Structure formats: structure tokens, C-alpha cells
Image (cartoon, grey):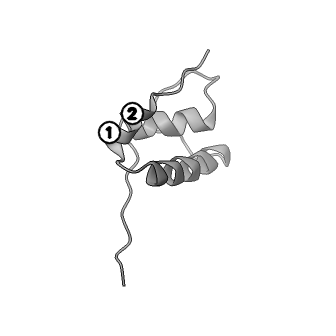
Amino acid sequence: MQQSPAIDKLLDKIHSIYKLVIIASRRTIELADGAQKLVDTPADFKPANIAMKEILEEKITYKAREEK
């Protein structure tokens, strides 16, 4: 049985729920399309849980756009 990481732990890494959702969803799509996992997980982990684990382990980074 897979377990999702606690939201508060994820928010410690990315301090905005909106950024967290966008980053996790984009990475989930990449994983579903065949991207290589950056963390070790059991075979039954879903792409969304893999993305969240990658965020927790700081394997995923993001760069904020500069305002014009």
C-alpha cells in the first residue's frame, strides 16, 4: 500500500500550495509520459506519489519567472 507524503512536509520544501500543485502536476505528467524516476520507489507507486517523493527529497527544483 502506498502512502502519500504529508502536505505540511511538502510545504516545508515549497512554501506555496499553488506552486506545489503546479510543480507536482507537471512532474506527474512527465512521469506518466515515461520520464525516469529520480527516487527509489516500489513498483506500485503512482506517478503523483513519485513526484511528491521527489519534491520531499529535493530532487525537483524550480525557477521563478522574473516579473516584467
Q: Position of residue 18 (x, y in %)?
A: 48, 53
Count of labels shown?
A: 2
Residue 50 image position (x, y, % from top left): 53, 34
Contact, CB < 8 Å: mark 2 with mark 1?
Answer: yes
Helix, strand or loop at disc 1?
helix
Residue in the image at 52% along x and 40% along y: 51
Is residue 58 in sight in this rendering?
Answer: no
The N terminus: image quadrant: top right
Q: What's the distance in space between the residues labelled 2 and 1, CA to CA? A: 6 Å
Residue furthest bottom in the image: 68
Q: Residue 53: which numbered mark, if any? A: none
Which residue does the numbered mark 1 point to in the structure image? 12
In the picture shown, does residue 35 fall above or below 6? below
Task: Estimate how packed mark 2 is, as few (under 14), some (14 to 19) or many (20 or more) residues with alpha carbons within 10 Å.
Answer: few
Compared across the picture, whether 37 is left or right of 13 comes to right
* Residue type at the position of mark 2: Asp
**In which quadrant will I find the C terminus?**
bottom left
- Residue 10 is situated, as x and y percent measured from the top left of the image, at 40, 37
**Residue beneath label 2, please?**
8
Residue pictured at 53% horizontal, 26% vertical? 4
Q: Amino acid at mark 1?
A: Asp
Q: Secondary structure at mark 2?
A: helix
Q: Position of residue 33 (x, y in %)?
A: 67, 49
Residue 66 seen in the figure: yes
Q: Nearer the viewer, residue 43 or 5?
A: 5
- Which residue is at the far right? 33
Left or right placement of residue 6 versus residue 47 in this view: left
